[in-house]
Amino acid sequence: MRSFWKGDGPLLPAFASRVLGSSDLFERRGRKTWASVNFITAHDGFTLNDLVSYNDKHNEANGEDNRDGDNNNHSWNHGAEGPADGAEINQLRLQQRRNFLTTLFLSQGVPMLTAGDEWARTQQGNNNAYCQDNEISWLNWNLEEDQKELLEFTRSLIRLRHEHPVFRRPKFFQGRRIRGSEIRDVMWFNPGGNEMSDDEWNSPFVRCLGMLLSGDTIDVQSFEGEPIRDDTFLLVINAHHEPLQFVLPGQKAVTWQLLLDTASEDGFCRQPQDSQSGDEMEIKNRSTILLKLVTGSTAQARHESWKKRQFAAPHNGEAPKEKPVQEKTESAAEGAAPAHE
């Protein structure tokens, strides 16, 4: 997860597998999604804030000439080591903190949040602070305004996860067609509004995709014996270094409502913002958006965009290019990353 958001690759199949609860690791033994404990940081290593603020560990205060602690942190300072004054660097760091938190709380499995990450606690680059009983390791709850805003963003993510069982299913997603029907519980789309192809899954340069979670395929009953249903969501992730246009999937008459944009000022949208299937949405570089289906059925949403475009997977690190589809083509993918099949 750290490496994917940092921009390393090729990691798309592994990233998709982790978001869906790591069925490749746990399902074969008959376990449920809660067998996967998901975390970005732990008590050892960088805090979330330091993960996006330092390239290297800074453990000089530990008295071992910076030899202690792990050197392989998969971190990135985004242009300056430690605290920075540049607005562009700080905005990108904020987006990345939100990206990590969003990925954590909207993934299947059990989220584990390290204390203080919800408001960007720092250990000043120390990734082995067990021996520090001082401001390096203490939790300071006298929060600055930007820390309060990140705390509220985290609370909103937790609330969203709590209110929607589609983000915490007990059973793993199947990805393929269920029981011979045309229904799939999860589908993957490229920025052109097409289902992801094998070439795109295997490309080292593709870092943008959409994940559609069907709220009518949770396959779990309530204590009263009634099937549990939920809303249908589209999570779009762009770890590319440039903005990309993303064609929203679905047949005509499908409306998506934007709930969250990690590149926006507030993170969560204060006012509803509706878009139609076939519309092109700009996904900012290194950002995540979440949309909810508000008009049309889930069956109508579970389709490639009626205005889909051919999407050429890049082969040289450049931004992908799109062109209108001339003929209707069938996707090469069944809707799930190869790691889940």
Image: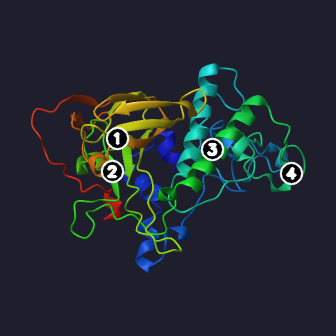
User: Do the numbered discs 3 and 2 sit on residues whose CB atoms are within 8 Å?
Assistant: no
Q: Which mark is residue 298?
A: 2
Please name the amino acid that badge 4 sits on: Gln
Please name which of the two marks, 1 or 4, marks the residue nearer to the observer.
1
Residue sitting at 71 percent across and 56 percent down? Answer: 44
Q: Earlier in the sequence, mark 1 or mark 4?
A: 4
Q: Earlier in the sequence, mark 1 or mark 2?
A: 1
Q: Earlier in the sequence, mark 3 or mark 4?
A: 4
165 versus 53 height, above or below: below
Residue 98, given in percent of the width and then of the height, sits at 59, 39
Please name which of the two marks, 1 or 3, marks the residue nearer to the observer.
3
Please name the amino acid that badge 2 sits on: Thr
Q: For label 4, count other residues whose C-alpha is less than 10 Å away and answer few (under 14), some (14-19) or many (20+).
A: some
Please name which of the two marks, 3 or 4, marks the residue nearer to the observer.
3
The alpha-carbon separation of the residues under discs 1 and 2 comes to: 27 Å
List the single residue furthest toward the right. Answer: 134
The alpha-carbon separation of the residues under discs 2 and 4 comes to: 52 Å
Horizontally, residue 119 falls left or right of residue 64, namely left
Find numbered disc 1 in the image and state the secondary structure of the residue it sits on: loop
Horizontally, residue 236 falls left or right of residue 144, namely left
Find numbered disc 4 in the image and state the secondary structure of the residue it sits on: loop
Residue designated by label 4: 132
Which residue is more in the foreground, 162 or 84?
162
Residue designated by label 1: 206
The alpha-carbon separation of the residues under discs 3 and 4 comes to: 32 Å
Q: For label 1, count other residues whose C-alpha is less than 10 Å away and answer few (under 14), some (14-19) or many (20+).
A: many
Find numbered disc 3 in the image and state the secondary structure of the residue it sits on: helix
